[in-house]
Image: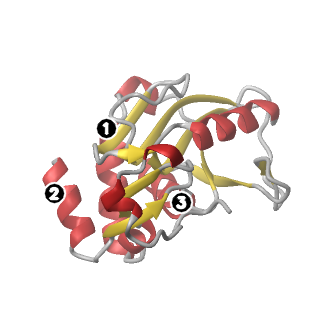
Amino acid sequence: MTDDDVLSEFRSCDALLEGHFKLSSGRHSAYYLQCARGLMNPERAGRLALALAQRIPREIRSEIDVVVSPAMGGLIIGHEMGRALGKDAIFLERPTGTFELRRGFTLESGTRALMVEDVVTTGLSSREAIDAVTREGGTVIAEVALVDRSAGEADLGVPFFPLVQLNFPTYADGEVPDSLAAVPVTKPGSRK
């Protein structure tokens, strides 16, 4: 699946939004990819997961014991990646602001995990989720994401294989251009 194919999948379901958005990272953007809309159709979600699984080098794919994803954004694509790889898929939650396993999910010491995200912008959520897996006894051996918004700059500390890279500009609070600042801001992400 090419970058154009991936973007076509998201455009077909109105998942690529334009406006003024405050991202989960705290940065501002004129574009937002609402991956949940793209994943709401099980057929499309399955196609995207299969394409994403094909991005993982064979030697890493063969080492994966379990798929882990952070809720909320990574939940659907994490589940579909589990299906595509034939592995169990579990997820992390933030009931008190810090990622942790709940709902009876556990990791045996040394379990090799694939971290699955929907979108990576700065990598902060990914690093927090990777730290949680480590605290739980597992080891994240790689991460995949539907979208890398970091322009290849996110350092996750593990090999990273995005399905597509989008290089829409993002801005810190004090750097928002006047034209974007004039548009009412919405916050569609999962963090308050």
Secondary structure found at label 2: helix
In front of the other: 176 or 129: 176
Q: Are marks 1 and 2 in contact (CB under 8 Å)?
A: no
Q: Tag 2 or tag 1, which sits nearer the N-term?
A: 2
Which label was assigned to residue 79? 3
Q: Amino acid at mark 3?
A: His
Report the residue at 21% width, 75% height from top: 12
Query: Is disc 3 surrounded by few (<14), some (14 to 19) or many (20+) residues within 10 Å?
Result: many
- Give the alpha-carbon distance from disc 2 to disc 3, as whole Å: 22 Å
**Residue 41 vertical position relative to residue 153 in the rendered view, above or below:** below
Q: x and y percent of residue 78 in the render?
A: 52, 55
| Residue picked out by circle 1 | 55
In front of the other: 192 or 115: 192
Q: Tag 1 or tag 3, which sits nearer the N-term?
A: 1
Secondary structure found at label 1: helix
- Give the alpha-carbon distance from disc 3 to disc 1, as whole Å: 17 Å
